[in-house]
Image (tube, rainbow, N blue to C red):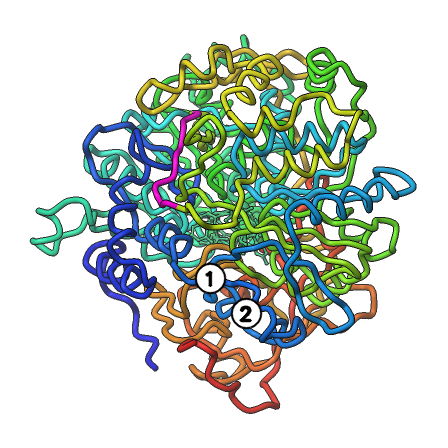
Amino acid sequence: MSYKEYDNAAGGWGALKATTEHLLKSNNVAKNLLNLLRTNQDHGFDCPGCAWGEKGVPGRFRFCENGAKAVNWEATSKRVDRQFFAEHSVSYLNQQTDYWLEYQGRLSEPVKYNPANDHYEPISWQDAFSFIADKLNALDTPNQAEFYTSGRASNEAAFLYQLFVRRFGTNNFPDCSNMCHEATSVALAEAIGIGKGTTRIEDFEEADAIFLFGQNPGTNHPRMLETLAAAYKRGARIVALNNLKERGLERFTNPQDPLEMLKNGSSPTTSDYYMPKLGGDMALVRGMVKALYKRHRQAVEQGSAVFDMAFLEQHTDGMAQYLAQVDATSWTEITRQSGLRRTDIEALADIYQKADKVIVTWAMGITQHKHSVDTIHELVNLQLLGGNIGKPGAGLCPVRGHSNVQGDRTMGINERPAAAFLDNLERVFGFVPPRAHGHNVVEALQALQRGDSKIFIGLGGNLVAAAPDTAKVAQAMRNAELTVNIATKLNRTHVNPGKDAIILPCLGRTDIDIQASGPQKITVEDSFSMVHASSGRIDMRGEQMRSEVAIIAGLAAATLGARTPVDWRAMSDNYDRIRDLIERTIPGFDGFNQRLDAPGGFYLGNSARELHWKTASAKAQFFSHELPQRIVPVEQPDEPNVFLMQTMRSHDQYNTTIYGYDDRYRSVFGERNVVFFNEADMQRLGLTTGDLVDIESYWHDGSVRKITGFKVIPHEIAQSNVAAYFPEANALIPLESVGDRSFTPTSKSILVRVNRSQQQAPLVSSKSA
Ligand SMILES: Nc1nc2c(c(=O)[nH]1)N[C@H]1C(S)=C(S)[C@@H](COP(=O)(O)OP(=O)(O)OC[C@H]3O[C@@H](n4cnc5c(=O)[nH]c(N)nc54)[C@H](O)[C@@H]3O)O[C@H]1N2
Ligand SMILES: Nc1nc2c(c(=O)[nH]1)N[C@H]1C(S)=C(S)[C@@H](COP(=O)(O)OP(=O)(O)OC[C@H]3O[C@@H](n4cnc5c(=O)[nH]c(N)nc54)[C@H](O)[C@@H]3O)O[C@H]1N2
Ligand SMILES: [Mo]
């Protein structure tokens, strides 16, 4: 194994080769090729990969390597059936890797856990619904149940789910967003009056500068590389701000551009690259503003301005206080926290100042810290000073994760629903929805841990592996009286059952969904607030899986009985009827069914983009936070082997779904238990490539959180920072270590101590399974 730097551009022949290999592995080659051709086209399905948007160019074959993997993984012909469960006990299954569990194929019939023999056994759909309904109705209060959602659920499924659960009587809606872009939703709602990004994909064609904060699009949003390469080509300045060097942020060969492929050419995706320390972005942006403010004052003396004074006067509140805070922040603190030199920050300020239209994007490198909400406020402050919100070619662009995570929120998957949303539910459905806030992910897991919550229902996802503190979370799940998982593939959460447990197998995005009225489409909303339809292509006749909508309708009918606000059967017979209800309940969906015919779907609109500020002050709000006292919630011991760690995705995974053991762009092959170090730190500690280390995290509850036998790999990463993969390193993150006001686990800032491992190299992982 060598850790030679991957010297090709991102994308290109490497991506094509990897895509082909994955197609060949899936036992379904011909079907899958057909599927790829239909991804993100007008009459195909929405890619179950990421939430990056698409500008409809009819007839163009658009896919990316990782979208291909996602489609392919779902479209396998392998099945997990009653025989599989008869052969394997749950304890046996829980010893298998995440890769192995999902590789076994699609879940294919409802099963119920039998604690007497530790096996899942078949159960009929109707018996499963009745069993779950009886358990739900026997609770002391509806607040003893937790209803989790993962962001792949369609708008239709999510809307029905929240209607069912609110009628049942709780706002306990923990969802994957709580672990993802929650800080974005909180910060943007406060600052600009809407918790979503203000850019449209067209803005990338006009922007003069694009600042990319804390994201790795080469792996996680590959279609974004095409957008960036195009912007670069027409002369936009593209600045990457990332804790480590990511290949996709340097160069990209478009696998869709035959000329570039043949010439073995590639396009740069960024013009400038800076590597701040973990959690240092707020200080970095503060530094940019400090530099700009100085120039602004000088300019004002000469009768001009650097800041957009007309915009600021008309549209914002709190600027003076913020600028006083900027004055009060020292360069010493700014450079210490950001890890960048003052000259670097001045250079960034230059780029910002010279650009008329600036887009700022961000993802998990910004949202998974203790001070993420404050950091996003700081990004907004910067953009307000430049007047870069609400004009074409500029704006705020949080890049979402799951393909419909934004849509699920629009549909009401929210443990803290807005009063207006609940008023609408009450008006349309004639029942009084619960008003008290429900549980987010961390609160739900704590309630299960204490035994206060007794039922967990998961609409997709894999909470045991996605949440922090793996062992504690698995135990919390096992404490439950009942766990129910609606899922496509077997995962860690299913093999940590409650006292009773049921798995309900569902159709995925790629499957044809036929109901009484014929084949159905579902809808999703991308990062740019575009709503579009998606219909699957794989024939599932003869299979027992049901659609998510049908499963939710079945559960709701069984549970609510006479209390029902709608005819659930009618809803699952024809999803147009669900869309009609969405139209009546949620603003922006007028003519929902009709408007879906437009190519590329329709735009939901964004009040902030229209310079309409739904904030307390009715203006765009500056927030003047002090820089964090310290990046982590615990005191940092003064020891040479103490590091700040981030957890991130490899190129061969989709969250907890592991497609393979390679991370091509980071030159890691055949393994995942690795930890990336700066070479200077390795030298300082006397570590060499391939050494094994044990990693332990600090927290003040006395628990030991440790992972062992991780292989040391040198990488371009900020000094005193290290990085490892999610979910392998989740065991290190205390459940209580969360972002201020976002409650998002601090997956990008974990204080750890690294020691040379006492144990031998771990056995080769079950890659060949
Ligand atoms: N193929 C694939 N696509 C995916 C996913 C997947 O797992 N696989 N997951 C989907 C989901 S749910 C999401 S949320 C997105 C995630 O998309 P990303 O946010 O790109 O995901 P991460 O792998 O967590 O990468 C975080 C990036 O931020 C950098 N970073 C970490 N901490 C800091 C910091 O403090 N400051 C700065 N400036 N940079 C930092 C890391 O070096 C890394 O490049 O992708 C979505 N798309
Ligand atoms: N340490 C650390 N932890 C993290 C993160 C991190 O960066 N670091 N990232 C966080 C982020 S951003 C997120 S979004 C969460 C992800 O958390 P989740 O959304 O809970 O996890 P996934 O891995 O996306 O869920 C995968 C499972 O979803 C099911 N599934 C797939 N497709 C479908 C479908 O169409 N319908 C249904 N019903 N089920 C389906 C399959 O059974 C599969 O096993 O993890 C978070 N956890
Ligand atoms: Mo996410």
In the rendered structure, which amino acid carries the disc numbered 1? Arg
Q: What residue is shown at x 76% (from left), y 33% (from top)?
A: 171
Direction from residue 261 to residue 145 in the image, left or right: right
Quarter of the picture containing the C terminus is bottom left
What residue range appears in magenta? Answer: 531-539
Residue 598 vs 237, above or below: the answer is above
Nearest to the observer: residue 755 or residue 584: 584
Determine whether label 2 and label 1 are within 8 Å by CB.
yes
In the picture of the structure, the residue carrying the numbered disc 2 is 84
Q: What residue is shown at x 62% (from left), y 15% (from top)?
A: 585
In the rendered structure, which amino acid carries the disc numbered 2? Phe
**N-terminal-most mark, 2 or 1:** 1
Residue 265 vs 172, above or below: the answer is below
Q: Secondary structure at mark 2?
A: helix
Direction from residue 403 to residue 629 in the image, left or right: right
Residue 155 vs 344, above or below: the answer is above
Label number found at residue 79: 1
Mark 2 vs ligand 2: CB below 8 Å: no
Magenta-colored stretch includes residue 538: yes
Q: What residue is shown at x 36% (from left), y 35% (from top)?
A: 210
Q: Secondary structure at mark 1?
A: strand
